[in-house]
Amino acid sequence: MPSFKQTFWKVWYQYLSRRIGSDPVTFLNYGYWPPEGETIKLQPDDEPNRPAIQLYHHVASGADLADKNVLEVSCGHGGGASFIKRYHKPKTYTAIDQNSKAIETNRKTHAEHGIDFRTGDAQSLDFPAEHFDAIVNVEASHCYPRQDAFFKSAHRVLRRGGHLLYADFRTRETAFQLDNDIADAGFKVKTQTDITEHVLAALRRTSERYRNLVHTFAPKILHPAMETFAAVEGSGVFNSFVNRERIYFSYCLVKEVN
């Protein structure tokens, strides 16, 4: 039976999908903006989503995905899946999310890219063992009730030598548990990077857009909660990154050959 936490996030994201409706919100992450600024040349249609895309590009660049079989876990509204499929050129791209409404929309919105969108549980990946060359997971695992189960399931479905390309945040008090979960699953840490300042730089660039979006599609009573969810500048979540009560990490993890 799903836990309260899992049910809450499922209902919350389904609500977001319904409220956003036809608005072109295909990314739900906080973004990434390093000191060097623009880190990839984008097509004009992708430019409005540059901060969010640069987070995906930072994560996906941890391994060569060209001609590989790739799985994205918790794909949200599919923007990252579309970006990786078009720019990083994997052979196949499968993307799962527990939000069936989002999956239904993704199949229509991103139909031309040949992405296999499916409803699925991040904590129990329904694929054969050693099935994928790489797994992408961006800003999602903090919502999982059993985060250790996700890492173990990801390890199972990765081929030997495969990569888990991962980014998410934790509180200072729970960051150690993330490293424990990674180690217990059997992954070797190839790289670990604190990208908190780069995420804050992106949030400063996107706050006005997302505050306006919240005020457009959400009832006024929900504005404070939605602004906090979007981590707009001045919100509790934004300030927690400033104060380093929350720390944002990216990892490149490897399933060892032996």
Image (cartoon, rainbow, N blue to C red):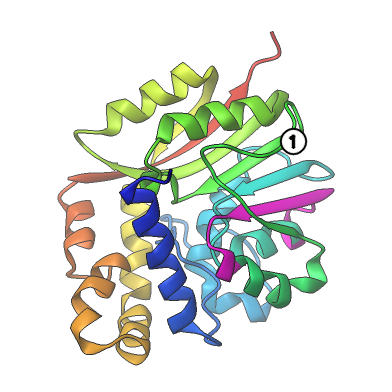
Figure quadrant of the C terminus: top right
Magenta region: 86-102
Answer whether residue 125 is magenta in the image: no
Compare residues 41 and 225 and report the one nearer the observer.
Answer: 225
Image coords of residue 32 (percent x, y): 44, 58
**Number of callouts:** 1
**In this image, 58 relative to 45: left or right?**
left
Dot 1 lies on which element? strand
Figure quadrant of the N terminus: top left
Q: Does residue 238 sit above or below 205 in this rendering?
A: above
Q: Residue at x 18, y 53 (%)?
A: 240
Image coords of residue 213 (percent x, y): 37, 85
Q: Residue at x 37, y 66 (%)?
A: 12
Q: Amino acid at mark 1?
A: Phe
**In this image, 243 relative to 124: left or right?**
left
**In this image, 80 relative to 133: left or right?**
left
Residue that carries the numbered disc 1 in the rendered image: 132
Q: Residue furthest top?
A: 258
Residue 38 appearing in the image: no
Image coords of residue 45 (percent x, y): 65, 81
Compare residues 215 and 18 and report the one nearer the observer.
Answer: 18
The picture quadrant where one finds residue 129 is top right
Image coords of residue 235 (percent x, y): 18, 68
Q: Residue at x 54, y 53 (%)?
A: 74
